[in-house]
Amino acid sequence: MDRFFAPGPNHLFVPGPVNIPDHVIRAMNRNNEDYRAPPIPALTKDLLEDVKKIFKTTTGTPFLIPTTGTGAWESALTNTLSPGDRIVSFLIGQFSLLWIDQQKRLRFNVDVVESEWGQGANLEILAEKIAADRAHTIKAVCIVHNETATGVTNNLAAVRRILDEYRHPALYLVDGVSSICALDFRMDEWGVDVALTGSQKALSLPTGMGIVCASPKALEASKSAQSVRFFFDWNDYLKFYKLGTFWPYTPSVQLLHGMRAALDIIFEEGLDHVIERHSRLGKATRLAVEAWGLKNCTQREEWFSDTVTAVVVPPYIDSTEIVKRAWKRYNLSLGLGLNKVAGKVFRIGHLGHLNDLQLLGCLAGVEMVLKDVGYPVKMGSGVAAASSYLQNTIPLIPSRI
Amino acid sequence: MDRFFAPGPNHLFVPGPVNIPDHVIRAMNRNNEDYRAPPIPALTKDLLEDVKKIFKTTTGTPFLIPTTGTGAWESALTNTLSPGDRIVSFLIGQFSLLWIDQQKRLRFNVDVVESEWGQGANLEILAEKIAADRAHTIKAVCIVHNETATGVTNNLAAVRRILDEYRHPALYLVDGVSSICALDFRMDEWGVDVALTGSQKALSLPTGMGIVCASPKALEASKSAQSVRFFFDWNDYLKFYKLGTFWPYTPSVQLLHGMRAALDIIFEEGLDHVIERHSRLGKATRLAVEAWGLKNCTQREEWFSDTVTAVVVPPYIDSTEIVKRAWKRYNLSLGLGLNKVAGKVFRIGHLGHLNDLQLLGCLAGVEMVLKDVGYPVKMGSGVAAASSYLQNTIPLIPSRI
Amino acid sequence: MDRFFAPGPNHLFVPGPVNIPDHVIRAMNRNNEDYRAPPIPALTKDLLEDVKKIFKTTTGTPFLIPTTGTGAWESALTNTLSPGDRIVSFLIGQFSLLWIDQQKRLRFNVDVVESEWGQGANLEILAEKIAADRAHTIKAVCIVHNETATGVTNNLAAVRRILDEYRHPALYLVDGVSSICALDFRMDEWGVDVALTGSQKALSLPTGMGIVCASPKALEASKSAQSVRFFFDWNDYLKFYKLGTFWPYTPSVQLLHGMRAALDIIFEEGLDHVIERHSRLGKATRLAVEAWGLKNCTQREEWFSDTVTAVVVPPYIDSTEIVKRAWKRYNLSLGLGLNKVAGKVFRIGHLGHLNDLQLLGCLAGVEMVLKDVGYPVKMGSGVAAASSYLQNTIPLIPSRI
Amino acid sequence: MDRFFAPGPNHLFVPGPVNIPDHVIRAMNRNNEDYRAPPIPALTKDLLEDVKKIFKTTTGTPFLIPTTGTGAWESALTNTLSPGDRIVSFLIGQFSLLWIDQQKRLRFNVDVVESEWGQGANLEILAEKIAADRAHTIKAVCIVHNETATGVTNNLAAVRRILDEYRHPALYLVDGVSSICALDFRMDEWGVDVALTGSQKALSLPTGMGIVCASPKALEASKSAQSVRFFFDWNDYLKFYKLGTFWPYTPSVQLLHGMRAALDIIFEEGLDHVIERHSRLGKATRLAVEAWGLKNCTQREEWFSDTVTAVVVPPYIDSTEIVKRAWKRYNLSLGLGLNKVAGKVFRIGHLGHLNDLQLLGCLAGVEMVLKDVGYPVKMGSGVAAASSYLQNTIPLIPSRI
């Protein structure tokens, strides 16, 4: 018996790990297999081909690494850079901060561009730095597509435009952990050199697979990159890709079968429809926040995130109490405010295999918690704002017309 | 791939089959077993003891029959009655109608007491009949505790009082399909002779087990009952109970393990808390219906059902369209209006392993559908009415305090 | 934690319930669904069409009844016969005995043709009775295709020949519980009027579905059959078939999805290959029994069963002890000797989704148990006899060539 | 449908990943959860305490890292050593070779002690090196407890004795990937500083968790170790241990629940009984190999492995063909010969949640394959040798007495 038993299911609205579709849970409900017998290489081959679609790349090379997003970061950095390399990195929230911490501890020379939390990456400063760097001392630009701590989505196309404008050869490394498979992401079109995500985010799998995709330029860079690496070394993967056995060490066959099911679902819905669905859910959430009279942590519309909304609470309320109470009383899991915004914001994750009625249930729950903690919310106001918008925009389910 | 694929889970709000808790799904995720080896009898023995608690009986004898509610009805009737026996039976909706159809086809002499759909059993007429029946020609009174088609809960204690008042020996047979484990039901206290339910209702299991509980008087009656029966014959069960092997034929071991898990969950929450939860969910639903300006099919408060609410739509709307559209557009499963109320009502099932946020998501969905079909609902109105009440009355989850 | 925990999996070799394929367990690992929404009728429609293939019928009408084999028997009898009807029925072991018990208690006039346990149905006596019955007082011939208690397979084609020879119009009812989907069975070719099986046998599902198939002649008979019935009444099914909703009462959606997966597997292997596989496994088991110096309960080769082998133990050994010890020491589940052969035989079930190495593991286990109980078995002898035969006859797995 | 479908289950006898108990598969059959809410820290706390038991340590600090065995190696090395550090490492087969490759690429100064494949670590040379190293230039001794490629178990106690004899302070790092939880391993008693295993080995979980345990001396060393690291850095774990939230990044909640179930099973059986069971299965396998007239790759009895047996085939047979055919014809998964012994040996893994009848089925299968490829095996000979031994030594299952 579950020690923290509650009637009914948990309502999981942290911005990852997200809800796993039943179809995927079923696909993973299985024994181990010999990963050297033909089925696993055959399965892997198809996955490597199909996973490129969620990066919108045809030229990239994907790696399905038994690790987390943190490991995927390490894989991106150590395979393409050498200790002491100058890299430009944007600090705009807790996850960009952690990546920068990693970049520093992995001994890169990190040129940090900081913004207030709630703002996007300062691309003007990037432009200045790139413009000034005629000697091409900047080896890479590292950016988090969607800062999960503040609900800020950066403009990746604009970064590419800056690099192109100055014909700067820096590598372009993107953390797409809370964006890929949910937000508009175009690896080839935007000239991203390494993009990465984690299985437990918009792909809606359990944690345990870091998915990294490298451009030809990134692969080329990996040949001379001097960072010490073994577990994360792409070369070992590439060697086994050539052999057709694909795995330098043991993969989780459950995650591979789960990924097959997850991609099948995404392709069934259509990646663009998946992205539109996230857009609708994001907008609906923001309408609810507005109706409640609360502020979005994200300071400008251009940065609004369609996968996570960080809601600022009034100074007399502790947002941590909201998250605790939501779980204790309503079995609703919301995201805490982290670091600088701890106690000040709570977060609603709205990514992955999620539909309108789930979100509306969550919003109704948030209203109840807000009332619990003394905020004068008008009950039903957020739900009404969200459902009015959703009702207007939801299509019939194609398979059911 | 699911032919009717939709993003996100289905929201299941028919009044059965209901949502299965994950804990139960896990428990059932298993291979077959030899039901003659020691584990299954040991498991069965405990289940037979524990299942009595959900009937609130200590003197009853339960039977876990591999069948549905319809089979459970047949078990109740054929084991206690003989062809031609006069029985009083109440027709108040589709399910009582079906039971009466069965009673007739099984060749009993059915004295039908009919009420308008939306009303409860007419107990005044029962009282008259019982009073008049000095010769005790009435062998049984058959009543549906909760008429699932109309959301009407009958007063079982009152039936007992009538029988007692006239010292009438008729057997008292109760269909508790959509009540037991969700509504207040007291087999011993109310002198019920046979009570029955189905696994897919408030017990929150898959379909496939008819659960029948017989009083000592019912067991006694079974010795002389002349109805032809074999599969449903209690005697075969009783023979194997004595042997300690328990099963006259093969049970579903998955359902037995599932039932263990389901009972564990119910006892963990506490049966009385389960019933209170249903009471809160029922009340919240009715508040929403009222806020929408719609009528409850149930005509008087005394009959309000805490497991299902049948909502009457205005004459210019076809309730079937509401149910179809809910499924096609929002992946929300509501109950159709049946027979006399087809097209006129739709039903919201709120029974089983369900919590507040699930129900609020459903209510938000109903609002969207109502708007879709042209009913001038105020968005958020029902959710607000429900959530205001729920927020006031929900306790902290005991395991999480 | 499992109260009867043992290291490693249980080795399930009772003649039902049998091992469920992982593919099927996965398919059943799911929540309930509204059986009135489009997916369940669509699924059911396909199942009803496809299940006919395992009966080898194109003209039959199948019923998927939420019951066990015992209920399927009752469905076959009560839908086609009237109380007092004379039927010929063969008593050759425990399961035919139980069916005859049912036939009697359902008030038919049963003309029992008994054979020694271990022998097949006495068709000479049948021929005499049929020949003598010029008045066509015999309304049905009831036969168990494969007597699970003794491992005896009857010759169904010969029964049809006898009926045809005398142009006798008796209905031909066949219990195919431990045969259909494993042994050669041809409903149309052999003119079987009602055939039936249970989900937990060769179809390799959990218990809970009785599968009954009726010929046009049987359906015609059902119109005038006077047996009282409701739950098992085909007419209710036929009414819902016409409506396209298919279900007179709630089915187990888990079993329907499981059946889809089970049929997919059977068709993938090919029904004829499935039957050949059972033939090989049956033969291998008999070779092992011979090598051990033990007798097959089945007295003649013509009756050898390819789904279950009943092994006769020497008089100084109690076969019940073998079954108990197999389970207690080796986690091996064998079938007990039943009734007349209790203590005298133990049974090895070799049906369903089973392969060579599983059977050889079982045979090795039986050898160990035989040694445990003092039988002077030569270790490895049975395994060697079986594996020599199997190695010679096993094909490469088609999908792996 | 599985593209490589075969009737019946796969028989998984590679030396990892191994068979997952049903109890564990069930426990992992679940949705994601918020790992920052109370249940996951509570679960983790218990796991960290309980996992120490399988290392037989009370003073060690465990880390449950979302990675594979290769990552666990990297964690052990980079947290305790600095680039250029001299380490002694034994090359005795493919897995020790891979570890040495990692050690070199991570820029340690590796002093390789090579043995012929099939022999254990050369401890005489170790003794010489340790004796000679008065300056304590050797910073660590790295050894694979059980070389999975050759089925060789090294004497860990002897290594400790050598270090103690010379009072040498070198760290003692042990790869226990195919030993811990299956072979006798005593971290504290043998003074092991870092021990590690992978979830998919004797713990019988899916792949995805590297389990590393550090002695106080190893933790002390981690404070000054200069190897660049981030993902694998113990300090981040230790920081979150202190906070009581335990996770520096997202764990797989499925694997945590699975580990709980796996440990419960191991403790239910008793770790010492688990080890004895492996001892019996190992011995039985070796008796079969002997009976077949084949040679064990392991050259001396002192090195015999109880988790994997590498079987040498005659020169006229290609062992790769045996492995391929086993899978193609019998759905039996055996281990390939790797690198130097490719084509020369095949491997039988006999570790994890495995019982006697499973192994005997495997051995029967190996006999059939041997015959297929032209080796003059006496059918049943290996099974008989194994089963005679097993029958003599198997205890009654305690829960079933």
Image (cartoon, coloured by chain):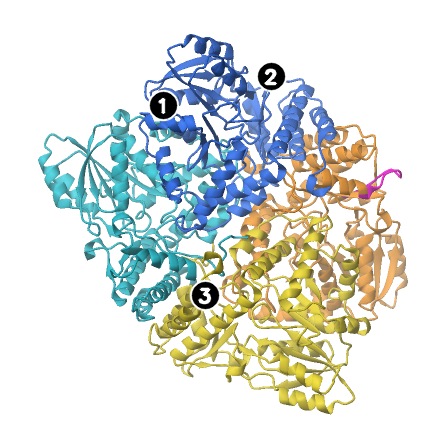
Chain colours: A cyan, B yellow, C orange, D blue
Type of residue at label 2? Glu
For the point 76% across and 76% down, the residue is: B81
Specify whether residue D178 is painted magenta.
Answer: no
For the point 34% across and 66% down, the residue is: A367
Q: Residues within 10 Å of mark 1 (few under 14, many from 20)?
A: many
Mark toward the viewer: 3 or 1:
3
Type of residue at label 3? Pro
Residue A276 in the image: above or below residue B283: above
State which quarter of the image contains the C terminus of chain B: bottom left
Secondary structure type for disc 1: loop
Secondary structure type for disc 3: loop
- The disc at residue B395 is 3
Residue B145 at what x, y percent from top left? 60, 76
* Magenta-highlighted residues: C309-320
Type of residue at label 1? Leu
For the point 69% across and 37% down, the residue is: C359
Residue C138 in the image: above or below residue C383: below
Q: CA distance from mark 3 to mark 1?
A: 54 Å
Determine contact: label 2, label 1, CB under 8 Å: no
Q: Earlier in the sequence, mark 2 or mark 1?
A: 1
Residue under label 2, please give it.
D302
Residue D332 in the image: above or below residue C133: above
